[in-house]
Image (spheres, grey):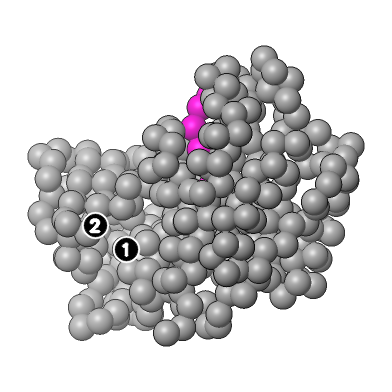
Amino acid sequence: MIVFGGWKRCVGAGLLCVFAATVWAKPQILKSYRIGEVRYVSVTDLAKFYNLGRNQINSAERVEYRTSTALLSLQAEQRDVTLNGVNHWLSWPVEKAHDRLWVADVDVLKVIDPVLRPETVRFGHQIRTVVLDPGHGGSEHGTHGISSGRAEKDLTLDLAKRVQEFLSAAGIRVVLTRTTDRTVELEDRVAFCREQHAGLFVSLHFNSAGGAEGIETYCMPPAGMVSTSKPSSQNGDADRMPGNQYDLCNVWLAHCVQRSLLRATQATDRGVRRARFVVLRDASCPAILVEAGFLSNATEERQLISAAYRDTLARAIGEGILVYKKTVEPR
């Protein structure tokens, strides 16, 4: 657990006010400093805290720490970092100041720590039921394949049934928000998850954006932080929403599933991203939304309409869920 508390000082020629707070976890100490309106932690201090060894790159703009069990790579002024083989989007860009790179403390707490120390993420009880949510359905077709015209709603249902088969074989109870081609309101999907007393909620979708390619997985932004699609300078939603009580579980689940999908498919990594989708915002358990490829991209479409490839996706999603489950359940 990381706890902030603090003391204060100002440095520089009156140009930069720095507020420091001490963070305790294990026997080590991290300090966070206020730069402008945001508190940051030095990347050098992070590397020491997580025993990441020495920076592998001789650059003032970019660092990479790599050990046999961990990887952290980031660049000044960028909002995305690489953590253990997966791209993660941060709430604030990496800052460069005083000849160092800095990461916002909220991103240390809500992104870096749960991924580099997953043993600290605990769900508290056994995960007995997983709810899979095939996106769209009925009058809501979703997007369509650029060449085949295949509807997203049909492909997500097929994918969900394949994931269900995989997880059921592993002894997990799996239920779907819809098992046929019918319209299900977003609020009803959330209510169904609550009624099932689910331990996990995974919404399945396919993407559309011209020639874009790759896989991305979404979870909730921390309270007060912006979604990935918005500039950090905009105001986030300050209210803590139901899904925020699972912030650490959400990002670790998203990481496990995204990493598994990338390994299985070798697809472009579009990262673990943040958005306040209704099914994530109002979730009663850890929840993610997977965009498993672009139907608007002719190459990816050919893969996605293949049953064999959807089998690959389903197994990867299932394996990611099993890794997460093994990590967070009480021993």
Q: Which is more N-terminal, label 2 or label 1?
A: 2
Residue found 60% across the figure and 52% down from its top = 163
Task: Decide whether residue 214 is among the magenta residues.
Answer: yes
Residue found farthest to the top: 147
Please give the range of residues in magenta: 212-217
Sort mark 2 into few (<14), some (14-19) or many (20+) by Cα contacts within 10 Å: some
Q: Amino acid at mark 2?
A: Ala
Q: Which quadrant of the view contains residue 50?
A: bottom left
Say if mark 1 contacts mark 2, CB within 8 Å: yes
State the quadrant of the N terminus: bottom left
Label 1 sits on a secondary structure element that is helix
Q: Position of residue 246 (x, y in %)?
A: 57, 70
Residue 71: x and y in percent read 25, 52
Determine the residue positioned at 29% across, 41% down.
Answer: 76
User: Magenta segment: does it hold 215?
Assistant: yes
Is the residue marked by circle 1 packed among few (<14), some (14-19), or many (20+) residues within 10 Å?
some
**Considering only vertical position in the picture, is 281 above or below 148?**
below
Q: Identify the residue at horizontal 31%, vertical 52% (top origin).
A: 84
Say which of 212 and 81 sits in front: 212
Q: Is residue 144 above or below residue 106?
A: above
Q: Using the image, determine if residue 177 lies above or below residue 60.
A: below
Q: Quarter-wise, where is residue 200 in the image? A: bottom right
Which residue position holds label 2? Answer: 70
Looking at the picture, how far across and down is residue 228, in whole percent?
Answer: 54, 44
The residue to which callout 1 is attached is 116
Distance between the alpha carbons at the discs numbered 1 and 2: 7 Å
Residue at screen point 58% across, 74% down: 127
Does 134 sit left or right of 44 as displayed? right
- Going by the numbered disc 1, the residue's amino acid type is Leu
Query: Front-most of 190 and 27?
Result: 190
Q: Position of residue 12 (x, y in %)?
A: 21, 56
